[in-house]
Amino acid sequence: MIKLNDERKIILGIDPGIERVGLAIIKVLPNNKKKETVIYSECFMTDKKMETHKRLALIYKKIQEIIKKYSPIIVAIEHIFFSVNQKTAIVVAEARGVILASAGVNNLEIIELTPNEIKQSVTGYGKATKADIIKMIPKIVDLPTKSLQDDEIDAIAIALSASSRLRYQQV
């Protein structure tokens, strides 16, 4: 199990998708005296007109670049749940598989979180709304000054939830 006193204390949070992938790197602090810090976030996009395998390759390459640059100790990723559009679910699952493979190639620990776990961790309520999450994120983490897209906020929330889970497991 990863311990939060590891020197690197970096978590890569990922909100998986095929067209938009939310990415965030947070630096985890060993105590709660200061807010954790987002040191990188992005909404990585692929072109709808590209073939799926080329889009997946771009996602794989992007994850590899981020891992190489920031050396996270953990990749936190959201479980996906779809009940309506099965075609979208399959393609997002393929993107998620590429992301997990990228983490696996680098021997990184994976933390998978359900949407309700993320909402509970960030807001204290498992059925919180997107607005609730957006409101809470700046209270828990120091954010970059740039404007953030929804996918980035989701990735930040995922990384924070992984950090919270680690803290809880180590108590």
Image: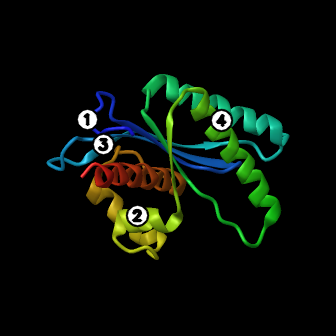
Is 50 in front, or is 166? 166
Mark 3 or 2 closer to N-term? 3
Q: Secondary structure at mark 2?
A: helix
Q: For the residues marked 1 and 4, what is the alpha-carbon distance in whole angstroms? A: 26 Å
* Residue drawn where x is 33% and y is 54% of the image: 164
| Mark 4 vs 2, N-terminal side | 4
Q: Which residue is mark 3?
A: 37
Q: Which mark is residue 134?
A: 2
Rendered image quadrant of residue 81: bottom right
Q: Amino acid at mark 4?
A: Ala
Q: Residue furthest top?
A: 68
Q: Earlier in the sequence, mark 1 or mark 3?
A: 1
Residue type of the residue flagged with mark 2: Ile
Residue 162 to residue 66: above or below: below
Give the percent coordinates (x, y) of residue 65. Answer: 56, 26
Circle 1: is it few (<14), some (14-19), or many (20+) Cα within 10 Å? few
Distance, label 1 to label 2, CA atoms, is: 28 Å
Colour scheme in use: rainbow
Q: Tag 4: Cα neighbours inside 10 Å, few (<14), some, or many (≥20)? A: some
- The residue that mark 1 highlights is 5
The residue beneath circle 4 is: 101
